[in-house]
Image (cartoon, rainbow, N blue to C red):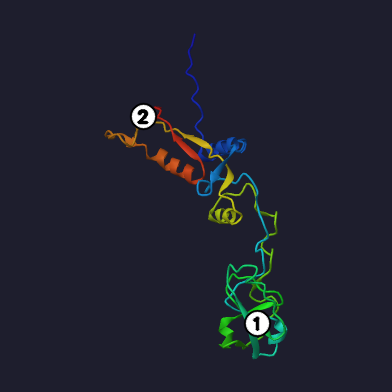
Amino acid sequence: MVMTAPAKPKLLSFTEARQVAEEYASKLAPTEPEMLSLLDAVGLVLAEDLRADRDFPPFPRSTRDGYAVRTADVAAAPARLRLIGEIKAGATTEESGIMIGAGESAEIMTGAPVPSGADAVVMVEYTERSGGVVTVQRAVQAGENIVPAASEASRGSIMVARGTRVTHTTVAVAAAVGRAEIAACRRPRVAILATGDEVVDINLPPGPNEVRNSNSYSLAAQVYAAGGEPAILPIAPD
């Protein structure tokens, strides 16, 4: 009886090995979601829709320091307007409850609510103030230097969709809608196994014909950067 040696397994090329890995990965299901603090969720995948808890912005917001005006009053610049108040960022309803009438204006800060009656904000650089009168030196268009209420998002609308990777932008949106924790998919665990009689662990002195296991740690760092949880297994001999 003639004994034949067992056939050696086929050595895959890099392209073939990558295809096998990608086909396997395509069949994996997302990991279960968990509630995490915003910073702990960075790099992971959002497992819920982040929705606006109110209109953004919740009021017509000034984008410049200057004066809230009616465009009709400054169409023929220069125009002199009577100052009837000041509106700061974070103003209360009472403080911002000014009504701009014909020939009137109110000083306004960046981020402050634009008062009723005004349809534009003139930048302070284009004005001169003398006591209770401001002189506007250029005309403006309706809506200039104003972000309309709900123009960024309306209450209940999706601001960041599930399946989005959590970045600093996602964290900012979550914080803006009052979320200290968000649902994110758990990090997938990825096993890393190095083989070879010549490979030794990095905390061991290598022999004359041995090398330290640097590749496993490089791969582990890449897995972590991609959102996974690496697990370096003991080195397996060939």
Q: Is residue 227 left or right of residue 55?
A: left
The residues bearing labels 1 and 2 have C-alpha atoms spaced at a distance of 82 Å
Circles 1 and 2, Cβ within 8 Å, touching? The answer is no
- In the rendered image, the quadrant that contains the C terminus is top left
Which is nearer the eye, 218 or 166? 166
Q: Which residue is mark 2?
A: 197
User: Which residue lies most toward the top here?
Assistant: 1
User: What is the x, y in percent for residue 222?
Assistant: 46, 44
Q: Is residue 34 left or right of residue 218?
A: right
Look at discs 1 and 2 and give the one toward the viewer.
1
User: Which quarter of the figure has residue 15?
Assistant: top right
The kind of residue tagged 1 is Ser
Which is nearer the eye, 51 or 17? 51
Q: Which residue is mark 1?
A: 105
User: Which quarter of the figure has residue 132?
Assistant: bottom right
How packed mark 1 is, by other alpha carbons closer than 10 Å (few <14, some 14-19, many 20 or more), is many
The kind of residue tagged 2 is Asp
User: What is the x, y in percent for residue 99?
Assistant: 70, 77
The secondary structure type at the circle numbered 2 is loop
